[in-house]
Amino acid sequence: MDILDVLNELEELVEESTKVPLVGKILIDDDLILDMIDHIRTALPEEMRLAKSVAVERERIIEEARNEAKRIVSEAREELSRMAGEDELVKRAREQASEVMEQAKTVSREIKIGAYQFADDLLGKGEDNIEKILNQIRNAREELRTPPKSEQEAAPTE
């Protein structure tokens, strides 16, 4: 079950729970809440695995860009070697090789920046989701720990 689904169920449970008059608190089945927390705990490793796979994919894209840049540079060098016999051709080949190398570097930089931005966006979304989940869990646990005012007032004084 997806973390967001469990959180939606948790929110629904809170909204549909029996309200205690005059105190503004609700009654919730603690076993149900604990079961939902267990679902969240089991789903969190999946979110982490997804974030890790994003990082691996980012590295793969960067490595592809590097390999492509190396291939382009290698082709440019081969072209330069082939044309080395004639001065004018050599001059043009060097210019073309230089242009190709600059283009390869530019493409490589753009791909790398894009991969980092993509990975950062996904990791940021994952981080936001995890923070929301943790805040909701903390709030739910705090509500479970805080007895309703009517119970506090009903407690005998010593």
Image: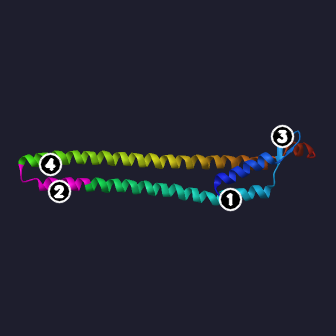
Residue 39 bears which disc, if any? Answer: 1
Which amino acid lies under the numbered mark 3 shown in the image of this protein? Gly
Judging from the image, the colouring scheme is rainbow
Name the residue at 37% across, 48% down: 111
Which residue is tagged 2? 78
Query: Residues under labels 4 and 3: Cα distance?
Result: 80 Å
Q: Position of residue 53 (x, y in %)?
A: 49, 58
In contact (CB < 8 Å): disc 1 and disc 2: no
In the picture of the structure, the residue carrying the numbered disc 4 is 93
**Mark 3 Cα shell of 10 Å, populated few (<14), some (14-19), many (≥20):** few
- Which label is found at residue 141? none
Mark nearer the N terminus (4 vs 3)? 3
Give left or right: position of 150 versus 77.
right
Residue drawn 35% across the image and 56% down it: 64
Per the picture, the main secondary structure of the magenta-coloured stretch is: helix
Question: x, y percentage for residue 103?
Answer: 27, 45
Q: Secondary structure at mark 1?
A: helix
Alpha carbons under labels 2 and 3: distance apart: 78 Å
* Secondary-structure class at tag 4: helix
- Range of magenta residues: 72-86
Q: Nearer the viewer, residue 148 or 107?
A: 107
**Residue 42 spot, x, y in % from top left:** 64, 60
User: 146 or 14: nearer the eye?
Assistant: 14
> Cα distance, mark 1 to mark 2?
58 Å
Query: Residue 123: horizontal and vertical position, in percent?
Result: 52, 49
In the rendered structure, which disc, 2 or 4, sits on the residue that comes first in sequence? 2
